């Protein structure tokens, strides 16, 4: 199942990717930074959706 991100987050990622591509000419460095960007958001979303289990 794919994760759906809010529109504002998609917009932020799109702008950050453009900034990374402008600032770094090395393609390998660009890919590393973009992957870090995605990992940051997917880890944040995973943690925010965890619910505590009830004591039954």
Image: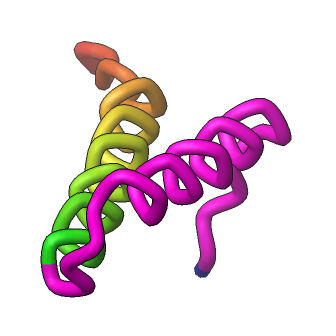
Residue at 35% across / 52% down in the picture? 23
User: Which color scheme does this rendered protein use?
Assistant: rainbow
Q: Position of residue 51 (x, y in %)?
A: 40, 25
Q: Quadrant of residue 30?
A: bottom left
Residue under the point 32% across and 17% down: 54
Q: Is residue 42 above or below residue 6?
A: below
Q: Residue furthest right?
A: 7
Looking at this view, is 31 or 38 the one in front? 31
Left or right: where does residue 48 sit relative to residue 32? right
Question: Measuring 42% from the left and 25% from the top, which residue is drawn there?
Answer: 48
Asked if 4 appears above or below 35 in the picture, the reply is above
Can residue 39 be found in the magenta stretch?
Answer: no
Where is residue 42 drawn, in percent x and y? Answer: 39, 50
* 25 relative position to 7: left or right: left
What are the residue bounds of the magenta stretch? Answer: 2-28
Q: Which of 10 and 19 lies nearest the eye of the viewer?
A: 19
Quadrant of the drawing holding the C terminus? top left
Residue at point 61%, 75% (across, down) = 2
| Above or below: residue 19 compared with residue 38 | above
Residue 27: give x, y in percent of width and height.
26, 85
Main structural element of the magenta stretch: helix, strand or loop?
A: helix
Q: Nearer the viewer, residue 53 or 30?
A: 30
- 4 sits to left or right of 44: right
Screen quadrant of the N terminus: bottom right
């Amino acid at each position: 199942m794919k994760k759906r991100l809010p529109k504002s987050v998609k917009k932020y990622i799109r702008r950050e990717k453009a900034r990374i591509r402008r600032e770094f000419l090395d393609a390998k460095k660009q890919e590393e930074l973009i992957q870090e960007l995605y990992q940051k958001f997917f880890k944040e979303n995973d943690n925010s959706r965890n619910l505590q289990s009830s004591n039954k």
